[in-house]
Amino acid sequence: MGPSQTAVPAPWSRVRHVFADTVGGNHVRAWVVVVLAALVIGTAGYVLLFRWSLSDAIYMTAITLTTVGFREVNELTGFAERLWTMLLAVAGVGIIFGSIGIVAETILNEAASGRREAKRMREAVGALRNHYIVCGYGRVGSTVARELVHGDERLVVIDILPDSLERAARDGHLVVEGDATDDATLRTAGIEHARGLVTTIDSDANNVYVTLSARAMSPALFIVARANAEGSEAKLHQAGANRVVSPYTMAGRRIAELASRPRVADFIDAALSHGNLSFSLEEVEVAAESPLVGVTVGALRDDGVVTLAILQASGAYEANPPTARTLHAGESLILSGSTDVLEAFRARA
């Protein structure tokens, strides 16, 4: 089962990624090269210039660069030895301050980039209109988001887990971090301007809370909720969900259809898929100001659009309507035809 908003976020996830990015930075590699070069040059100087042993030279270079201040392993009687040691001491101080600078720069850059990214994300989400909100980015939620994107729909993902948010951002989705049961989080995701909401959290209680909050904030919003346990479908419908889906029930039906009517199931899958197909199924709503009002089913057929069924304003389906049937405002059409024809038809409808 995919991650849900009831799980505890991994506290070190963000720190781990920041550390990995920092260590892999070019400036850190340059710093390591400088430290090693100073150690090698200092050791070589003591060995070649003053004839010290290798162990004494390495030890003296290390304690000088780190400004530890232990007693010299050999007496520094000559000016050249003292000058070499002073140069190493100055280099050590420079390396120490450089280390502090690198750490400070990394922290400041991370904070600044985080603020810039958060601001960019807020502005992008705030500009959305007629979009979808996906609550929970587990296995089910990520599949829903992918299918919506394939259908050229805009969406924003809400999740409380940093890992899930990172995956959603990597997949190219706008994200809002927070608890989807909180009204403020839904408001940040632009629920007042959203076309629909899909809640796929693996907790029925949270899905009920999300549905209740969303319905109260946007009465006209189309809500699809995930049901995990038996008996939760009725509660989600009562909370205001327009559709309730149980992944396990749907999987069972799908398996039964493939076993009993494989060609019908394959045809519907092909018609609803987002591949490069020559035919498709589409749903079009007849609005009050739509040019479809008063048009007959036969006229649509002449344009290459086949009307499979009409959902009347009362909620009843009229299958295979006659060619003389006139379309009315408030009805929804279930159409079939070539992909290009349906796309053009939907654009002008």
Image: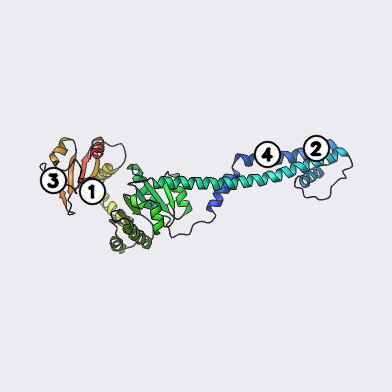
Mark 1–mark 4 CB contact (< 8 Å): no
Q: Which residue is farthest right?
A: 77
Where is residue 339? Give x, y as percent: 26, 37
Mark 2–mark 4 CB contact (< 8 Å): no
Earlier residue among tags 1 and 4? 4
Question: Element at badge 1?
Answer: loop
- Which residue position holds label 1? 261
Where is residue 20? Give x, y as percent: 57, 46
From where the camera sits, is residue 1 visible? no
Find the distance from the CA under tag 2 to the CA under tag 4.
18 Å
**Disc assigned to residue 45:** 2
Where is residue 198? Give x, y as percent: 34, 53
Q: Amino acid at mark 4?
A: Val
From where the camera sits, is residue 91 visible? yes
Q: Amino acid at mark 2?
A: Gly
Earlier residue among tags 3 and 4? 4
- Residue 41: which quarter of the image? top right
Earlier residue among tags 2 and 4? 4
Find the distance from the CA under tag 1 to the CA under tag 2.
84 Å
**Disc assigned to residue 321:** 3
Earlier residue among tags 2 and 3? 2
Find the distance from the CA under tag 1 to the CA under tag 3.
25 Å
